[in-house]
Image (cartoon, grey):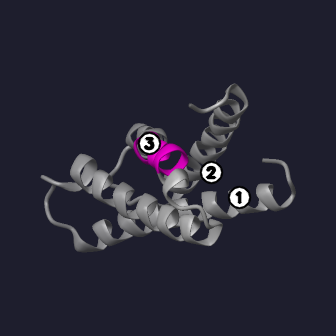
Amino acid sequence: MPTADFLRLMFVAYLITVAVETAVLLVALSRRHSVRARLFAGAWLTACTYPVVWLVLPPLLEERWLYLLVAETFAPVAECALFWFAFVRGRAPNRRATVRDMLAVVVANLASFGVGELLHALELL
């Protein structure tokens, strides 16, 4: 059972992750998505993958490098799939926009990972 301190840290890190990823998605997603959809995607995609990254994977992967490899592969792949199902599937085919959207999701995840690693290195998280 996670401690209160762990849950507080998880919540703060979630807010930081959402802020970083939403900022990237606002700028980088294709124009076929409204600002409202971009904002929703920024919070929703993270909400879907965050519990796995924070609660499921750490007990399974004790070595930090392996945890980071699995978690930071899982999150963008899962978020791309979720984004496609929620925001792309059923639209008129537009390969360029879809590639842009998937790259935006990956870049958003890389950006939040980078910010997280910086905060971890500075011992702020």
54 is higher (above) or lower (below) than 120: above
CA distance separating discs 1 and 2: 8 Å
> In the rendered image, which residue does mark 2 sit on?
20
- State the image coordinates of residue 52 (x, y, percent, origin top left): 45, 48
Under mark 2, the amino acid is: Val
The amino acid type of the residue labelled 1 equals: Val
Q: Position of residue 23 (x, y in %)?
A: 59, 50
Residue 87 vs residue 3: left or right?
left
The reply to whether residue 42 is in sight is no
Residue type at numbered disc 3? Val
Helix, strand, or loop for circle 3? helix
Tell me which residue sits at (22%, 51%) in the image: 85
First in sequence, mark 2 or 3: give its number. Answer: 2
Counting from the top left corner in percent of width and height, residue 77 is at: 37, 64
Residue depicted at 60% across the width and 33% down the height: 2
C-beta proximity under 8 Å, tags 1 and 3 = no
**Residue 115, numbered label:** 1
> What kind of secondary structure does the magenta stretch mostly adopt?
helix
Quadrant of res 84: bottom left
Assess whether residue 29 is covered by the magenta stretch.
no
The answer to whether one can see residue 79 in this image is yes
Mark 3, Cα crowd under 10 Å, few <14 / some 14-19 / many 20+, is some
Tell me what residue is drawn at x 42 percent, y 62 percent.
74
Callouts 1 and 2 close, C-beta under 8 Å: yes
The magenta stretch is 46-56
Q: Which residue is mark 3?
A: 35
The answer for how far apart the CA atoms under marks 2 and 3 are is 16 Å
As displayed, is residue 55 above or below residue 121?
A: above
